[in-house]
């Protein structure tokens, strides 16, 4: 594989999953970790991603700012956000995770919507604070530098005190058989709790994440009520998810 092709694949992985790990990329690309490390270094110098110890992060995931051209699959994420907003009603308690799709959802909320939002994501909380009619509850704790959400036992304990009407869950990996997966066990622990305490769970995912599996299990498809993508619900790529009993939007 040519270096240009290899680096294009690295960029695709980091943009889809926000974070990539050297060892995982090495296995996927069938090259040494040193080769992947050099590729990441070059991509970092070109300002196409952010190099971190042991891997890389998506550039669009790093700062609280709104730059459309920095957001991967921006149009698709906007479609998903608008679909998810249709489920929101006044006086709901809505638990919302992090990620660029939920950040876009927070940005385009109808101004007259009166909702109490609960989140572990600092960037999402900051965007929600700009909404004129809703309230924002932020559960703080140790902030993950990669996922940019609060993690740890105190966060899990705090979440247990709530019973949200809806959970808007951004996903890392999703597969009709393997369910929701993550690449960070502390993030997975928080997401497991979010799913457990919520009355209804909406999984928000761009189509490129479908049929992808990370190393750590978050939950089975039977724990999710609705899958929202940018695709038409009848799209053939969504057939396995419809067959699993999910509402697909």
Image (spheres, helix red, strand yellow):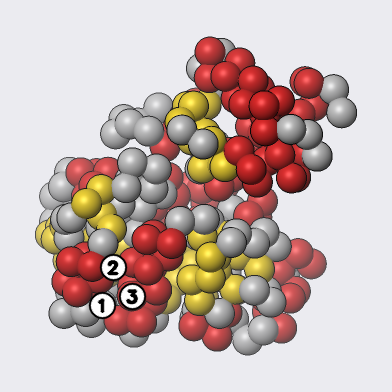
Which residue is under mark 2? 95
Q: Label 1 near label 2: C-beta < 8 Å?
A: yes
Q: Is residue 38 visible?
A: yes
Quadrant containing the C terminus is bottom right
Residue displayed at 66% across by 22% down: 39
Rendered location of residue 156, percent (x, y):
25, 71
Question: Considering depth in this image, is 92 or 27 the residue closer to the camera?
Answer: 27
Rendered location of residue 143, percent (x, y):
25, 48
Q: From the viewer's perspective, is 239 left or right of 189?
A: right
Q: Is residue 90 visible?
A: no
Name the secondary structure under disc 2.
strand
Rendered location of residue 62, percent (x, y):
37, 33
Q: From the viewer's perspective, is 192 left or right of 248?
A: left
Residue displayed at 17% across by 60% down: 139
Q: Label 1 near label 3: C-beta < 8 Å?
A: no
Which residue is under mark 1? 164
Question: Considering depth in this image, is 13 or 249 the residue closer to the camera?
Answer: 13
Which numbered disc, 3 or 1, marks the residue that appears first in the sequence?
1
Q: Which mark is residue 193?
A: 3
- Gap in Å between the C-alphas at discs 2 and 3? 11 Å
Above or below: residue 24 compared with residue 179: above
């Amino acid at each position: 594989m040519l270096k240009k092709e290899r680096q294009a694949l690295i960029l695709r992985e980091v943009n889809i999953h926000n974070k990539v790990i050297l060892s995982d990329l090495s296995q996927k690309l069938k090259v040494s970790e040193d080769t992947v490390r050099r590729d990441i270094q070059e991509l970092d110098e070109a300002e196409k991603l952010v190099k971190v110890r042991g891997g890389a992060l998506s550039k669009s995931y790093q700062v609280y700012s709104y730059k459309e051209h920095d957001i991967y699959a921006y149009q698709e994420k906007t479609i998903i956000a608008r679909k998810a907003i249709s489920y929101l009603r006044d006086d709901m308690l809505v638990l919302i995770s992090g990620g660029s799709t939920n950040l876009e959802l927070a940005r385009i909320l109808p101004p007259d919507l009166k909702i109490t939002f609960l989140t572990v994501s600092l960037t999402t909380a900051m965007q929600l604070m700009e909404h004129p009619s809703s309230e924002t509850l932020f559960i703080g704790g140790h902030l993950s530098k990669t996922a940019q959400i609060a993690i740890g036992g105190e966060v899990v304990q705090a979440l247990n005190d709530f019973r949200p009407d809806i959970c808007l869950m951004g996903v890392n990996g999703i597969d009709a058989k393997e369910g929701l997966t993550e690449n960070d066990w502390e993030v997975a622990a928080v997401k497991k709790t979010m799913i457990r305490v919520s009355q209804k769970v909406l999984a928000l995912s761009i189509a490129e994440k479908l049929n992808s599996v990370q190393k750590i299990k978050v939950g089975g498809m039977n724990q999710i009520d609705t899958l929202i993508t940018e695709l038409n619900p009848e799209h053939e790529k969504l057939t396995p998810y419809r067959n699993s009993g999910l509402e697909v939007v």
